[in-house]
Amino acid sequence: MSPEEDIIYVHSVAEAYLYLKASLCRSCRKGSLNPKADLTKTAAAPGGWMLSTVCSECGAAATIHFCINPPPTREQAHSQEINPTPHRSSAIDLLGWLTLFQAIIEASQRETDKQAARELAYEAALCLDEAMKFYDGDNELPAEDAFFNETSRRRFRDNPQQFARSKWRERRLKLPDATTRTIPAGPRRPRRRWWQFWRGSAKP
Ligand SMILES: [Zn+2]
């Protein structure tokens, strides 16, 4: 594969980290990918952004190249926002978003710090918003193009009801909405990045 073909197209810095969480190591096909450093903007990388990772199982190092469109401002690069556009993700498929949603909502329920738990619930809600973009019109079930690989497609064919839109819409209604989200006032405390809250937690 040429480097050009190996660029992952995402809509935000957050989506790039979520892509990592939704992916498996390409060497052993078992381990998850942990970031070795922050996602870095560099003209030297194909796509403009790069992230060095290491596999949790076999220790293989890999550098993933991203193109982020729309290009994030400094503020957006630190936000949890996943996708400011109406377009569906081309990096993470429907199964990926639903798996991320479940992993993040479980991390939120385990979290003892209230603010951190709220932030995770919000991030989980955003993952469901992305999942909803894979349903066309009023269809209750997604089309096959909502799945990006054979493993995902098989999961869908074996258990289509797991992907029923109404079920996920109901879950979404119980979660915080972007428009009603309150940003706590007061002095800013040193904070972890949200994607570190659930690092090493449930595997996809
Ligand atoms: Zn590996």
Image: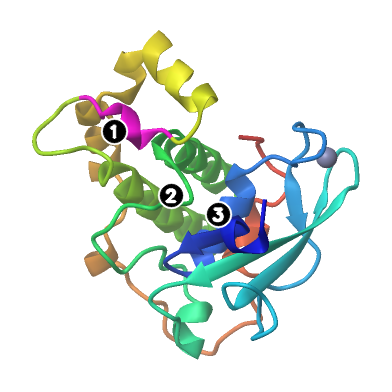
**Magenta part of the chain:** 141-147
Q: Nearer the viewer, mark 3 or mark 2?
A: 3
Above or below: residue 31 compared with residue 2 = above
What's the amino acid at mark 2? Answer: Ala
Which residue is the site of mark 2? 124
Which residue is drawn at the image coordinates 56% and 52% (left, top)?
A: 19
Q: Residue furthest left?
A: 138
Instruction: Give neighbour class at mark 1: few <14, some 14-19, many 20+ (Cα, 10 Å).
Output: some
Between disc 1 and disc 2, whose residue precedes? Answer: 2
Left or right side of 30 for 3: left
- Residue at screen point 70% across, 83% down: 44
Q: Which residue is mark 1?
A: 168
Q: Quadrant of residue 135?
A: top left
Q: Is label 1 in a helix, a strand or a loop? A: helix
* Residue ranking furthest to the top: 158
| Residue 145 can be seen in this image | yes
Query: In the structure shown, which secondary structural element does the residue marked by tag 3 occupy?
Result: helix
**Of pointers 3 and 2, the one earlier in the residue sequence:** 3
Q: Is residue 48 above or below residue 96?
A: below
User: Given contact means CB atoms under 8 Å apart, are the residues at marks 1 and 2 in contact?
Assistant: no
Numbered disc 2: secondary structure: helix
Query: Residue 34 at x, y = what percent?
Result: 76, 54
Please identify, in this view, whether the residue under mark 3 or under mark 1 is nearer the observer: 3
Q: Which part of the image, by quadrant, shows the C terminus?
A: top right
Name the one closer to the observer, 65 or 119.
65
Cα–Cα gap, marks 1 and 2:
12 Å
Kind of residue sitting beneath label 3? Leu
Distance in Å between CA atoms under marks 3 and 1: 19 Å
**Residue that badge 3 annotates:** 18
Residue 186 lies left or right of residue 31; in this view the side is left
